Amino acid sequence: MRRLMTLLSLITALFAGCDAQRAAKLEEGLSTEADVRAQFGEPVQVIERADGSKLLAYPRQPEGWTNVEIVIGTDGKMASLRQLLTPANLAKVRPGMAQAEVRQLLGPQAKTLRYALKPDEETWRWHVMAGQDKKVFEVIFDGERRVLSSAIADDERQTMPGGK
């Protein structure tokens, strides 16, 4: 039962497509780091934590719709697998947050935008799913690299003729 619940929550909370199929082959507390790498490949980043655990980062930006983090516990087993680009995490982005806090919360952005008329501002964009709809989540930072605002909008790759 525990395995079924873990599997269902991974698939439900995670994402559609190939990554969901990969995640379904893994189980928290049983799958090893080698199992994770066999399913997801080499991580883009490995962070060794002070407690001996490891965080494996699998961002799927700019073309994908997810940023996945997998924690390998001190026992070498998968402790957690989570998709960062969830509605709950997007809602946590607040004015005044530092860029580093936003990156830790959401993972690497798909794109960085700068506009000539607003030289002190920088916009980060992630591709996200809202149900079955493909969207973009944008965060605007001021010259101090703090959040000014954030918004979710339609992904023009889906709504503009010719897309991409």
Image (cartoon, helix red, strand yellow):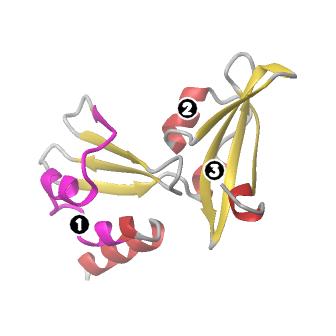
Query: What amino acid does circle 3 point to?
Result: Leu
Labelled pair 1, 3 in contact (Cβ < 8 Å): no
Please state the total of marks drawn on the protein image: 3
Can you tell which quarter of the image residue 138 is in? Answer: top right
Q: Dot 3: what SS? A: helix
Name the one closer to the observer, 41 or 49.
41
Task: Tell me if mark 2 has few (under 14), some (14-19) or many (20+) residues whose alpha carbon lies within 10 angstroms of its own.
Answer: few
Residue 21 as seen in the image, left or right of residue 77: right
Judging by the rendered image, the residue that carries numbered circle 1 is 26
**Percent position (x, y) of residue 97?**
65, 30
Of marks 1 and 3, which one's residue comes earlier in the chain?
1
- Label 1 sits on what residue type? Leu
Regarding residue 155, the answer to whether it shows in the image is no
Residue 90 is labelled as: 3
Circle 1: element type = loop
Q: Quadrant of residue 154?
A: bottom right
The picture places residue 116, in percent across and down from the top left corner, at: 82, 22
Q: Which residues are magenta?
A: 21-47
The residue closer to the viewer here, 59 or 13, is 59
Mark 3 vs 2: CB contact within 8 A? no
In the image as oriented, which residue stretches furthest toward the front? 162
Q: Tell whether 151 sits left or right of 38.
A: right
Above or below 67: residue 11: below
What is the CA distance from the residue labelled 1 to the residue labelled 2? 29 Å
The amino acid type of the residue labelled 2 equals Glu
Query: Circle 2 sits on which residue?
Result: 101
In the image, residue 29 above or below residue 70: below
**Residue at image location 53% in from the left, 35% down from the top:** 103
Q: Residues within 10 Å of mark 3 (few under 14, many from 20)?
A: many
Question: Disc 3 or 2, which lies upstream in sequence?
Answer: 3
